[in-house]
Amino acid sequence: METRDLILSKARFEDWEDMYRNVWSRPESARYMLWQVTTSEEEAKTRMERTIAWQRDHDVWTVYEKSSGQSIGWAGLAELSPGVWQETSIALGPDFVGRGYGRQILELLMDIALNRGGTEFRCSTRSENTASKALIASCSLALLGTEEKTDQRDGSAYQLNIYSKKIY
């Protein structure tokens, strides 16, 4: 699958180094996510094996930048109920934000959902994640509700904003 600047495809083992350098080792990438920073190359290789296995059975793809060929993040999608689809994650390395890539990914995920019979698309972000909220607003999703959550990494509380858009 492609956008103007990106390719979304299943991960390959050789992506481990790009993912480690660009995303997994970067605390700023993990800040609003539910995963821990990867701290070594060996851990990155093991993580890549888990990633490949997970992507095999789920609608999750590695994001590649066309101009450099590097793996720079990932994105996922799931059907919550008949016709209702949700992004399950969008993560980009900090060196690749601010380039319009997030919007390209979100629009592609909405197109995939629509092509699979979706009538509603949802996404979510932590209330303090201003960049993600701006991305979501730029794609005309409206706040549907909020949920109180606990970050399993450190036990801190956070508010998860859930957004929705009708797609036809």
Image: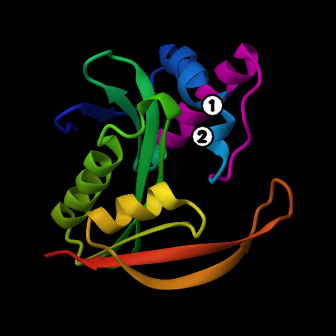
State the residue lying farthest toward the left.
168
Query: Mark 2 — residue?
Result: 29
Say if the magenta span includes residue 119.
no
Part of the protein shown in magenta? 33-55
Q: Are marks 2 and 1 in contact (CB under 8 Å)?
A: yes
Q: Can you tell which mark lies on residue 95?
A: none
Mark 1 or mark 2, which is nearer the start of the sequence?
1
Q: Residue at x 76, y 18 (%)?
A: 40
Looking at the image, is mark 2 or mark 1 nearer the viewer? 2
Percent of width and height locating residue 103: 29, 51
Q: Residue at x 63, y 54 (%)?
A: 32
Query: Mark 1 — residue?
Result: 24
State the residue in front, 127 or 58: 127
Residue 163 in the image: above or below residue 48: below
Q: Quadrant of the N terminus?
A: top left
- Under mark 2, the amino acid is Ser
Q: Residues within 10 Å of mark 1 (few under 14, many from 20)?
A: many
Residue 153 in the image: above or below residue 151: above
Label 2 and label 1: CA atoms lie apart by 7 Å
**Location of residue 66 by image quarter:** top left
Residue 61 in the image: above or below residue 107: above
Of helix, strand and loop, which mostly describes the magenta segment? helix
Q: Residue at x 29, y 43 (%)?
A: 100
Percent of width and height locating residue 158: 71, 70
State the residue in front, 95 or 62: 95
Q: Is residue 108 left or right of residue 143?
A: left
Say if the magenta span includes residue 35.
yes
